[in-house]
Image (cartoon, rainbow, N blue to C red):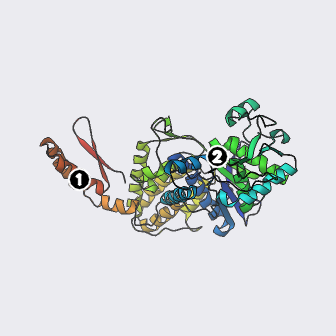
Amino acid sequence: MELRLYNTLTRSKDLLRPLDPLNVRMYVCGPTVYDHAHIGNARPVIVFDVLFRLLRRLYGESHVKYVRNITDVDDKINARAADRSISIRDLTEETYRWFREDTAALNCLPPTVEPRATEHIEEMRILIERLVASGHAYVAEEHVLFNVPSMPDYGRLSRRSLDEMMAGARVDVAPYKRDAMDFVLWKPSAEGVPGWPSPCGIATPGRPGWHIECSAMSWKHLGETFDIHGGGIDLVFPHHENEIAQSRCAFHSGVMAQMWMHNGFLMLEGEKMSKSLGNFVTIRELLDEWPGEVLRLAMLSTHYRQPINWTRQGLGFAAKTLDKWYRVIGDVEAETGEANPFETEIADRLADDLNTPSVIAHLHHLAEVAEHEEASSALRRRFKGAANLLGLLGDTETGWRARQKEAIALDEGVIADLIAQRIAARKAKDFKRADQIREELAAKGIVLMDNKDGTTSWEVSR
């Protein structure tokens, strides 16, 4: 099977040719742990989890190494810790734990390695001193800056003009810069914020710039050059452009990663997600209402490179889809591996640049086949195994599956009778009883919706 992925560097779908098929290496930019991760953060986590699963199937679990970093030194972290009057370490430990819990609830496999920036300061210092020694960086007023003009093809990834890059980077016009585009590799630390011994003989303790972290951690765990680097489209410039500059100039290499993959933006109900707009939602808030499997299916229903409009309607559709699929598979065990032709069909579709919409459409077809064929037990096992490549239809008896079993056990006539009782209670102004009925149904995974015409409808939403 040939795996073709869209490479931002070449602007084309390229055939993946691992540098070493026995050691396929992927790096994905992870979160800055200062608060609960928002639903936009979940998109690269889910997308690259699907790629990780596919790579493991193609090359073997022991031959794929997936690194996703944790940024635990940052001005936002410092400010949030001060606001909460807790130590920076206590804050990052707590928020990192939240992130791990949320990604596990989304049924994402843990990466092979999840390095923390604060544990790789020495690697950052080594890279910075190499860059200074080779003339690609310089020391100025206790800062170390990368000298962008020293790299002739800087900007190759984003393909932006100089004016566009300056605007996108929100250039700091510090007087000590040699060039307006130069960016910080190391900066002095003020009192009360984390600081480490500085490189290049600088006497004042300092801390790293954002971009150098990923160059150091990818080098430490994957080597000077590796196969795939991933992240959100917002990271193309300046973060990934600057990573490339640092790593290539430190190691005098032609490339940092062979392939650069980026997922598209996420909109919330048709608007840009923003705290200031009041439409900001975290993964944890959504998990309080929907199982992670629903969020996962809704996320994969749009191709990863396209913008996604995250809506409540989309979540409801994903929930109903999973409801049907769980009815189809019943309690069968998944059939996995090369012997499962359904799984092979799904893998073939994923091999075309992770075409998850095509996969989901095919799963709908396979569900119909498994539901109606006489040899349904074997087909249901194959269907479940195929869905597993997307991280769906797991064997857990908690979360979605347990709630669905409870909800499905309710006869629709019983639901209709309880709704009628609730309408009567509301007419009699017995709101306590009406609320009790709503809560009773909600506990079973049934959500009631009161319509403008006085009727009440319901749906399974958890």
Q: Amino acid at mark 2?
A: His
* 58 or 133: nearer the viewer: 133
Query: In the image, is 149 to the left or to the right of 296?
Result: right
Q: Nearer the viewer, mark 2 or mark 1?
A: 2
Which residue is identified by label 2? Answer: 262
Compared with 149, 104 (above or below) is below
Q: Nearer the viewer, residue 293 or 353?
A: 293
The relative height of residue 158 versus residue 194 in the rendered view (above or below) is: above
Say few, some or many: other residues with alpha carbon within 10 Å of mark 1 (under 14 / 14 to 19 / 20 or more): some
Work out which quarter of the rendered image holds the N terminus and state it. bottom right
Residue 9 visible in this rendered orientation of the protein = no
Q: Looking at the image, which residue sits at the far left?
A: 428
- What secondary structure is found at the residue carrying circle 2? strand
**Residue found 26% across the figure and 58% down from its top:** 410
Q: Indicate which disc, 2 or 1, sits on the residue closer to the N terminus.
A: 2
Please give the name of the residue rendered at 55% of the width and 58% of the height, measured from the top-left corner.
96
Front-most of residues 68 and 394: 68
Type of amino acid at the residue the image marks with label 1: Ile
- The image shows residue 140 at horizontal and vertical percentages of 80, 42
Label drawn at residue 99: none
Left/right of residue 184 with respect to residue 101 in the rendered view: right
Q: Give the residue drawn at x 62%, y 59%.
A: 52
| Label 2, label 1: how far apart the Cα atoms are | 45 Å
The C terminus is located in which quarter?
bottom left
Looking at this view, name the residue that lies furthest to the top. Answer: 163
* Horizontal side of residue 204 vs 118, given as left or right: right
Q: Is residue 279 left or right of residue 45?
A: left
Circle 1 residue = 415
